[in-house]
Image (cartoon, rainbow, N blue to C red):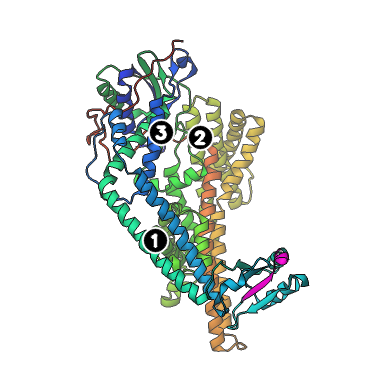
Amino acid sequence: MGLLRPVAMSKVGVIGLRDDRERVLNVLHDLRLAQIESLPAEALAQLLPERATDVQRQIGDEALRFRGLRNALPPVPVGPPRILSSLPDILAAAKSVTIDAEVGELKREDDRLTTEEKAIDESVALLAKLSFYPDRLENLRAKSFVSFFGEGTAEARVALRAGLPPAADPLFLEDPRGSDGFLIALRTAGAEALARSAQSNAVRLVPIPALSGTPSEEVEKARTRRAEVVRRRVAIVERLGAISRDWFDTVAAIDEALQIENRKVEILSKLGAGRSTFALEAWVPTRDVPRLETIVQSAAEGRAHLYRVSTHDEPPTLMENPPGIRRFEFFIRFYSLPQATEWDPTLTFAIVFPIFFALMLGDWGYGLTILLICIWMIRGFPGVQRLPKFGRTFVGRIMGPSAMQSLAYALLPGTILAIALGLTFDEFFGVHVSQLLFGTTPIADPLRNLPTLLLIAGFIGLAMVTFGFLLGALKEYFHHHPRGALGKVGGIAFAWGIVGFGLQVIHFHTISPPLGPILAGSLIGLIVGAVLLVVGEGVQNGVMALIEVVSHVLSYTRLVGILLASVVLAIVINDVAQLSVHSTLLGPFIGIAIAVVIVLIGQSFNVILGVFEPGIQGARLIFVEHFSKFYTGNGKPFRPFGAARTHTVSTIGPDGTATVPLMGGTPPVEPTPA
């Protein structure tokens, strides 16, 4: 389990006989521990890349066929996993499935009927609007004129008429029921002018359908036909269900086996081949190399050799944090995936971000509200359909459901801490509830204890900057960059020196001799830190780093700034509402109504700010002021070869060791001698 570091990775190579290649690929697939890489040029100089064969193309065709069959059949409960022990067995089983024609015909008919059902529904809706037309619809069809049903406001209809030339000879029939619908018939030559006028005046036009009876007669015909379509679709579903009960188990197993074979075919281009040997290279978690070697040896019956490859290539990144901490990987991946050889800051983020969020929120009313919203998000937004359209659209456009859930889980600790801190501040939507009800004095008041809070924020900034430089120094040391490590140590010394110097000056208002030990130590830290930064980073970068250290420490005072903004805004909302209640001009009832509206809208706005401002600014303080001291990012994610088996027997037993390997795969192809 990686903590503060991604999982250590090693590059390994495997050399074995071609007769054992498929056994080895089977266990690699089912283990899902190895990210197979392309062989380097020097290895390929001694070997040949694999070439596609007719059997491999057949695998691709059959995989596409069975994926379509599986998607077409309704899922049903399946039995135990099946054993498909060799590629010939898989292909033979695939040929035994003879339901393609019937399933394909049923799906095509169902698609056609679905389209027809939708067209019938649209036609019925149009005919219902046309019910004010008393004659037969066939009277609206002729070679010399065209007819449309339109919808638009009274002003739009007047403008539409004005935009038509007299030669079009238009005939209008408006709905006597007072709706916005109307019927228009005009000469064919005026159709283009009608389209332009309708577009410019926001009038919706629909051609009159080619029907013969009256609207009411055609509605009855359409409903009768729709009932026939629905009955046929139900029969199709029942027939597909019957086919699925007989065949789904077989289709799912063959589909899974073919997908596995297809994955093996796809990675063959990364392997090297000799007349009777094969070779591959892969990234594997270092802890799993001994186990992988044992399983590969077992699969090849001792005829394969696994060895470690010495390389300077950047490994892929596999983060493996504890379950609770893992929720915060969402933020790290959103920023940038760490490289495999640097620090994984997920644990730091998981500890610090909730604290920052709580400090900037600092109100138990807001914290409780956001906590309930997070629980709603985690449960999948129950009842979201009851929200107004704007609310549903807003929820859907921010991010996807899974991302919203990850965000909600990450905000939970921060909201709980915000509730605790809000109780300490006695802040409930900007009101001191305990003081109001019981006359108790808050343990701390953000407005009265502002200097203390600013001092705490400054020391938090100093701690975060120091920790960032410490991680940076260790990273430079582990990467054998002594000058870079010196520069990071200089950043720590300079940060402590500037903070100690600043506090002494603020407290004593002078730097006159004799200097105290704290001030002397601070000046030494300033000088030593500046020198080390310039030596480690260079003159230009070192001078910029000196300014950056000061700005980054001071930047953490925004923790208090955002807290104060929220508190003051809540107080202003409450004061304005209170003024409305006591207003002599409005009267008591109107004043109370206006006050309720002000409180609801204002506090809702402040809740939204309470999510975005602490969330964005808290993450920013970590990403910019902390990460910049040690974090490079742009890591490559670890993507192991393989996938879980559901319908076929795995080559790996429940205890994690190899069972009797399956013999699937393509037959070896003799390469052309180099």
What percent of the width, then of the height, locates residue 527?
Answer: 61, 35
The residue indicated by pointer 3 is 60
Q: CA distance from mark 1 to mark 3?
A: 45 Å
Q: Nearer the viewer, residue 19 or 67?
A: 67
Q: Position of residue 334 (x, y in %)?
A: 50, 45
Which one is earlier in the sequence, the residue at label 3 or at label 2?
3
Q: Secondary structure at mark 2?
A: helix
Quarter of the image for the N terminus: give it: top left
Nearest the viewer among 552 and 74 is 74
Foreground label between 1 and 3? 3
Label at residue 375: 1
Amino acid type indicated by mark 3: Gly
Q: What separation in Å lies between label 2 and label 1 (alpha carbons)?
A: 37 Å
Q: Residue at x 48, y 43 (%)?
A: 333
Secondary structure of residue under mark 3: helix
Q: CA distance from mark 3 to mark 2?
A: 49 Å
- The image position of residue 542, as x and y in percent, is 63, 33
Quadrant of residue 276 within the rendered picture: top left
The crowd level at tag 2 (other Cα within 10 Å; few <14, some 14-19, many 20+) is many
